[in-house]
Image (spheres, grey):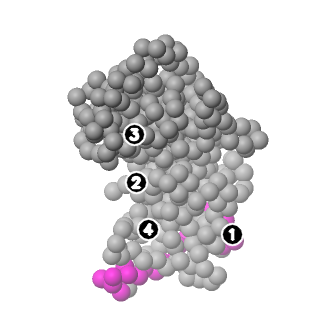
């Protein structure tokens, strides 16, 4: 059983990591938790169950000892109610709470018993609010304490949540996780770095590459880059305006070169769609040599996606569609081979990468 992520929804990017409750949906909400009347760390009391077997879930009540408060005012105890094991998707965190364990919980309602709608297993000790006294500041301090614990699952959950919060004050801890010997911990770390708009080492990313990483890269790479004033950044190449997307210092060429070697990436049209969606979105010059090499691959769908990405990167056009490509593949391949001979030299420069530099 994984320790549930909660509080901060990946709706910021559209990707919901495993065991994540959709609660908070923006940077401001990550600080203020507007959907919660109260947020606090508690020792779960005895859980009384009612309506067992109901399609709406078993109704549970408990009186919990309050260890510390993140948001709102609450005394030494708080009465809570919640439902778990309902029909439909599981509610990670809420479904898994146990009597006697310590959790950071989010509650709503005007009077007791308050409804618990999110829960995350936490360390037992009182954690000092070293980042500040806003709810998000207090949560970040709790997450850092969780990361420093000896519980492997709690450590991973903390890093995943730091990434969803996108608070770079935790970047040192996240960077350490990305270098961890445990692969699951390292994956959580590199995903969190990317969400924080800090470029992880591309070789490390591809060592750990799986569908979860690919899905996050697909969603996050569509975010436009912004300057210090918050305005989106454009560049102009050969008369075409390009909206800068992705991270400026991530090596997307290595992503293309190493990723397409994975058999599971080529297993069906959906994985190819997501995989190639990253170079298609970021339109990076350094990806062009790698895309050209893919024109020689035996898989026709791979060749088509390479042509799609080349067309979007070089000409800023979204074509050719599959129906056209199926009938005119030789023409398309001949066009790009000719183009490469005539203009490819300009696309051969090695990219400059700077690991660990936050994007603006």
Q: Which residues are magenta?
A: 51-74
Query: How many numbered markers are drawn?
Result: 4
Q: Which of the pair 253/339 is nearer the observer?
A: 339
Tell me which residue sits at (53%, 51%) in the image. 13
Which quarter of the rendering shows the C terminus? Answer: top right
Asked if marks 3 and 2 touch (Cβ < 8 Å), the reply is no
Mark 1 residue element: loop
Q: Is residue 64 magenta?
A: yes
Q: Which of the pair 91/152 is nearer the observer?
A: 91
Q: Which residue is mark 3?
A: 320
Sooner in the amino-acid sequence: mark 2 or mark 1: 2
Q: In the image, is 301 to the left or to the right of 188?
A: left
Count residues near mark 4 (Cα–Cα under 10 Å), then give few for <14, some for 14-19, many for 20+: many
Which quarter of the rendering shows the N terminus? Answer: bottom left
Please state the horizontal and vertical placement of residue 340, each as a whole percent of the image. 43, 18
Q: Which residue is mark 2?
A: 18
Q: Is residue 321 magenta?
A: no
In front: mark 4 or mark 3?
3
């Amino acid at each position: 059983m994984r320790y549930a992520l909660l509080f901060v929804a990946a709706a910021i990017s559209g990707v919901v990591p495993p065991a994540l409750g959709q609660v908070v949906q923006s940077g401001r909400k990550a600080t203020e938790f507007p959907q919660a009347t109260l947020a606090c760390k508690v020792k779960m009391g005895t859980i009384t169950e009612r309506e067992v077997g109901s399609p709406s879930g078993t109704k549970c009540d408990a009186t919990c000892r309050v260890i510390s408060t993140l948001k709102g005012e609450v005394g030494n105890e708080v009465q809570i109610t919640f439902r778990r094991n309902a029909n439909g998707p599981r509610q990670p965190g809420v479904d898994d709470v146990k009597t006697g364990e310590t959790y950071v919980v989010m509650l709503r309602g005007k009077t007791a018993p308050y409804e618990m709608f999110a829960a995350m297993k936490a360390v037992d000790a009182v954690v000092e609010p070293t980042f500040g006294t806003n709810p998000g500041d207090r949560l970040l301090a709790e997450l850092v304490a969780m990361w420093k614990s000896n519980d492997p699952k709690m450590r991973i959950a903390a890093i995943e949540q730091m990434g969803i919060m996108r608070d770079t004050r935790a970047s040192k801890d996240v960077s350490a996780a990305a270098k961890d010997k445990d692969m699951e911990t390292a994956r959580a770390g590199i995903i969190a770095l990317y969400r924080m708009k800090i470029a992880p080492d591309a070789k490390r990313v591809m060592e750990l590459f799986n569908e979860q990483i690919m899905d996050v890269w697909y969603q996050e790479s569509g975010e436009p880059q912004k300057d210090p004033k918050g305005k989106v950044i454009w560049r102009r190449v050969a008369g075409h305006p390009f909206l800068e997307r992705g991270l400026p210092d991530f090596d997307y060429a290595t992503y293309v070169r190493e990723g397409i070697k994975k058999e599971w990436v080529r297993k069906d049209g959906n994985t190819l769609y997501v995989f190639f969606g990253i170079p298609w979105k970021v339109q990076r010059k350094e990806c062009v040599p790698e895309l050209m090499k893919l024109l020689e691959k035996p898989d026709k769908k791979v060749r088509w996606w390479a042509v799609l990405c080349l067309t979007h990167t070089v000409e800023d056009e979204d074509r050719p569609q599959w129906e056209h490509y199926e009938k005119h593949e030789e023409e398309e391949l001949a066009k790009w081979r000719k183009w490469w001979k005539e203009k490819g030299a300009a696309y051969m420069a090695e990219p400059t990468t700077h690991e660990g530099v936050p994007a603006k």
